Image (cartoon, rainbow, N blue to C red):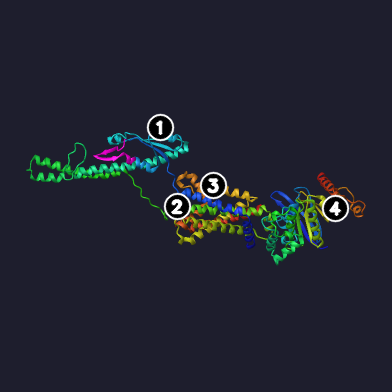
Amino acid sequence: MSVALRVSALGKRFGELVALEDVSFELAAGELLAVLGPNGAGKTTLLSAIAGVQAATSGTINRTPREIGWAPQQPALYSKLTVAENLELFARLEHAGDPRETVDAMLAQTGLAERADEQLGRLSGGNRQRVNVAIGLLGDPPVLALDEPSASLDPAQRERLWTFVSGLTAAGRAVIFSTHNPAEAQRHADRLLVLDGGRLVFDGTTGELLARAGGATPQALAGGGAQPSEGDLEHALVAFLERREAAA
Amino acid sequence: MRTLLRKDLLILARSRLLVVVLVLYPVVIALLIGFALSRGPARPHVAVLDETPPGQTVEVGGRRVPVSSYVDDLLSGVDATRVSTRAQALDEVSSGRAVAAVVVPPDVAARVSSGTTQAQIELIYNGNALQQSLVSQELRSALAEANVGFSEQIQRAAAEAIGVLLRGGNLGVLGAPSGFVGLEKVPAVLERVIARTPPGPDRKSLQEVESFARFAAQNLETSKRVLATIGQPIKVHSVLLSGRRTPLNSFAVVVAASFSLMFLAVLLAAGGIALEREEGALARLVRGLVSAWSLLSEKVVLSACCALLVALAMLAGVGAFVSLDWGRFPLWLAALACGALAFAALGTAIGVLARDVRASSVLAFLATLPLAFLALVPSAAVGHGFYDAISVISFVFPFKPALQALDAAVNDASPPLLGPAVHLLVLTAAFAALARAGLRRAL
């Protein structure tokens, strides 16, 4: 599979505080990558640096900010404008060929056509998040970065969001998202990154993390010997981070 | 920038309450300030008890000056209520209906006429320290004016009496001869008598008397002018160093327009930037879609244009009541534009400090209102060191140069428009640079 995003030795400092240190990974086209870690681990900083919201102190990213779609945790939209007006504003700023056509296409793709003329402030949290993601997709970027996309959604809205994101990866788009919810990562992500104290401490699949934490081996999982249940990853993540802390 | 302008105009149009408040509040504040500056302080309400007998006069060399003229002068300087007893006067003051009572005692005429004892009136007042100070100042001023008026009448009466003594006639004083010759004519009469008198001791004595009479007549004439000088020893001749004197009401219009311009430009610009942060859109915009300078420029231009339009409409509206020179309209525009840009740039610098629109509005009010009032403090009103501090603050804050620019544009006042306009443009650049630095920190 081709590499959609390559991050090399990325670092970010806020004065004396090291928010990210020497973070390197690759993301393949069509891959869905989850970023996990405790509070303050650097998840949002990593996605912000990838999206170009915050300039990295060191390291390189093989994409420019405009080649990466970005949906922040809180929908970055104007609540006094309608869904269509928000989309059109950002389509114009993205220099989309025909902004109105782009908006129509995005409304159809996100299933928001019926809500096009509603002011954003009157939409549910789920629909607002869909518009938020839709705006990230306006420039037709090969990579999409989602910062805790399901944080404020109810289970049904969360399900609709992941169905939509799965459609994006199925179409070949690479998606990286941060989450506090290991179960969500376990269910939807192809691969996991675990950050702790700004450092990348794990890069692999769910099975590999379970194995590193002392659970079933990846081979056993791959052979169908034992299917991990929801919650296994959460325990494994906690155990993994505690083991690292004890070793340190 | 056009896309962002369109977006902000749409948001403004949908925030009707905000627009109404943003326009009405500064207009109301500006009008209040304008009225406060253009109207002099209200005349104090005073109870006046005149205990002098009706028709009483002060006699000066046979001329009579009615005491009622003094009371009339005093009444014209205050909002007076005549009372007939001392108890009523005290009641007016203690009930708060009058800030003070003035009692003119019955012996005023006798004391003034005596020429040896000064007449005395009584001032009764009440209230807290501030009220006492205000009443005391206002009434002393009214009493001083009445004193000057009364003194002038007495001077005139004295001058008339001196005139009769010089030129002859009837003095009207008991025991004075009627139709006397007058001191001016005495030397001529004596000269004729001397001419007929043979030389000898009598002629010599007559010549000495004639010489003294001439000297006395000349000096009595001089005493009339001395009397006028004593009445008002120093007259004031005002000289304005440079520029044209601005009438208070025209200056009030300029102050009101400057306040309007400041509030609108600062609040809109601060709110505009804060809204981007509140909605979370700031990060999305400046990650390559829009440069920080473009974003700041758009906010500054939009806020400045809106503020300029409202201030211009206000000037035009007030112009219906106060005479303004419409021939200077292009200068008005230039001054308003420079002021609006500086205020809007200040607004963006305030806006980047706040996380939401409400906080930015509070911050904008807290920062601008006291600083604007400081710019209005006259140099003589505070201590030297404090005024130096105020001058520094006023130099780095756009209100004073905006006021000077608008005063120069509207009233042709000094300093001329160019200096304050350049000052405002420099402040625009400085505040925009501050906002740019703040924007980087805000992300």
Q: Is residue B368 left or right of residue A18?
A: left
Asked if the stretch drawn in magenta spans residue B178, the answer is no
Task: Write down the quadrant of residue A176 in the picture.
Answer: bottom right
Say whether residue B311 is visible: yes
The span from disc 4 to disc 1 (Cα, nearest Å) is: 99 Å
Q: How packed is label 1: few (under 14 Cα within 10 Å), some, or many (20 or more)?
A: few
Query: What amino acid type is highlighted by mark number 2?
Result: Asn
Query: What amino acid type is highlighted by mark number 3?
Result: Pro
Indicate which label's residue lies in the foreground, 4 or 3: 3
Say what secondary structure mark 1 lies in.
Answer: helix
Residue named by callout 1:
B87
Residue with the most extreme top position: B87
Say whether residue B348 is visible: no
Please, which chain is the residue tagged with disc 2 on? Answer: B
Query: What amino acid type is highlighted by mark number 4?
Result: Thr
Asked if the stretch drawn in magenta spans residue B58, the answer is yes
Task: Write down the quadrant of residue A46 in the picture.
Answer: bottom right
| Image spot of residue A162 (x, y percent) | 80, 56
The stretch of residues the image draws in magenta is B53-70
The disc at residue B249 is: 2
Residue named by callout 3:
B370
Residue named by callout 4:
A206
Please, which chain is the residue tagged with disc 3 on? Answer: B
Query: What amino acid type is highlighted by mark number 1?
Result: Ala
Quarter of the picture holding the N terminus of chain A: bottom right
